[in-house]
Image: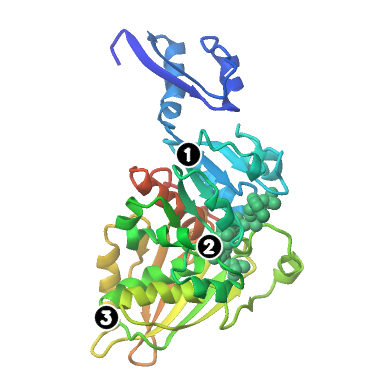
Amino acid sequence: MSAASINYTICFDRGCFTKYELKYSKVKKLNQKKLTMRGSAAVTPRSLEIAKIAAPNLQKQVRIGVLGASGYTGAEIIRLLLNHPYFGITTMTAERKAGEYIGSVFPHLITQDLPKMVAIKDADFSDVDAVFCCLPHGTTQDIIRDLPKSLKIVDLSADFRLRNISEYEEWYGQPHRAPELQQEAVYGLTEISRDEIKNARLVANPGCYPTSIQLPLVPLIKANLIEFKNIIIDSKSGVSGAGRAAKEANLYTEIAEGIHSYGITRHRHVPEIEQGLSDAADSEITVSFTPHLMPMSRGMQSTIYVEMAPGVAVEDLYHQLKISYEDEEFVEVLKKGVVPHTRNVRGSNYCLMNVFPDRISGRAIIISVIDNLVKGASGQALQNLNIMMGFSENTGLHYQPLFP
Ligand SMILES: NC(=O)C1=CN([C@@H]2O[C@H](COP(=O)(O)OP(=O)(O)OC[C@H]3O[C@@H](n4cnc5c(N)ncnc54)[C@H](OP(=O)(O)O)[C@@H]3O)[C@@H](O)[C@H]2O)C=CC1
Ligand SMILES: CC(=O)N[C@@H](CCC(=O)OP(=O)(O)O)C(=O)O
């Protein structure tokens, strides 16, 4: 920028266009979906104003599609993307809510100018570089199979998480219809697999429970600090984990003022957790896993009971977690004795964890907390796409937890 003039670029996506056209007479409405203006202007209050608006838009160089924008993880990725300097939303899809604007489905987004949601069959992927696929598992395989091969994809569903197709079919109760894509998919537990994620076209974003469980256990298993048997995991989730589609079991009266277990011994995250832990151990690990539903909208805690390897003390587990995550922005091993609370990660991409001695000698209790919709879904998905597109991993993820 010279002292006398200022370079500006204005890149208007559909929806944003009219707003700025009214505001800045320099911008002529063209009959285009997208208009990019470049030039220079004398430094005046107006040109500075244009540049201020233009700078972030200029940089929105990656065009994003959100499939399943009308669901909880879709809404959450939109919330995060709206503050992302390089990713701009050009396409959004819905099923029942197709034809509606996001603000009518999610009023907390009503102030945002975003494209109308369309049915997937009507979506135009010609102006999309990457998609977040926020669709129910089972539906995702067919849809991803038909997307242009040039697209980078982060799939939030479980469809491509299990390498073993027959295991998928057993736990999800349906045939896998895109096994060839499964071979290509990279399991996207960011802190553990970022080197593979960098070169991936299709990333299978981990489940929320498996994220909260593998983050603390993988480093301890890799360091041989815990026994590979008798791992007991007790997890608790907020109700948004079940998605937005109406279900009787998720009515306020069924959830409020109580807590209950579900999926005992047969929850579909068991094979995903065991796959990750077995990879870390390089031998087969089985776990006891029981999820619970909590009367809160978002948040997740996993309490994990382990046996330490002979001669290992709780301090060794703590030290290992500390050194494993000392350079990680989104995983925080708390000070000794501090108990992680789900309320301290709400709305953020953080995982907080700590390890405590059990009163039974030789055993330890690990606690980790995440926001199921952020680190457990959309936040981690954004972390992964940042890596896939060559941006700094934390871009657009500087949200501090909400309080209260
Ligand atoms: N909620 C969570 O905490 C987490 C969820 N996930 C996974 O992310 C995915 C999305 O979850 P979530 O956002 O909670 O789910 P929701 O039920 O809230 O949203 C599902 C979305 O998919 C759309 N949809 C439903 N059926 C179809 C179909 N047949 N074809 C095309 N679109 C369809 C819905 O559109 P419409 O509403 O318009 O019908 C909606 O936009 C799931 O696979 C889930 O398991 C992963 C980690 C955590
Ligand atoms: C509370 C609740 O119902 N949670 C969901 C898990 C969350 C989720 O969406 O699972 P994926 O990450 O595999 O998609 C469940 O138990 O099936």
- Report x, y in % for residue 227: 33, 86
Q: Residues within 10 Å of mark 2 (few under 14, many from 20)?
A: many
Give amino acid for label 3: Asn
Which tag, 2 or 1, sits closer to the chain's start?
1
Which tag, 2 or 3, sits closer to the chain's start?
2
Q: Where 278 falls versus 377 (above or below)?
A: below
Query: Mark 2 — residue?
Result: 159
Query: Mark 1 — residue?
Result: 83
Q: Residues within 10 Å of mark 3 (few under 14, many from 20)?
A: some
Give amino acid for label 1: Asn
Residue at horizontal 60 percent and vertical 62 percent from the top: 138
- Report x, y in % for residue 22: 60, 15
Give amino acid for label 2: Asp
Query: Mark 3 — residue?
Result: 224
Q: Identify the disc placed on residue 355.
A: none
293 sits to left or right of 326? right
Residue at horizontal 30 percent and vertical 16 percent from the top: 1
Residue at horizontal 50 percent and vertical 37 percent from the top: 128
- Report x, y in % for residue 304: 44, 79
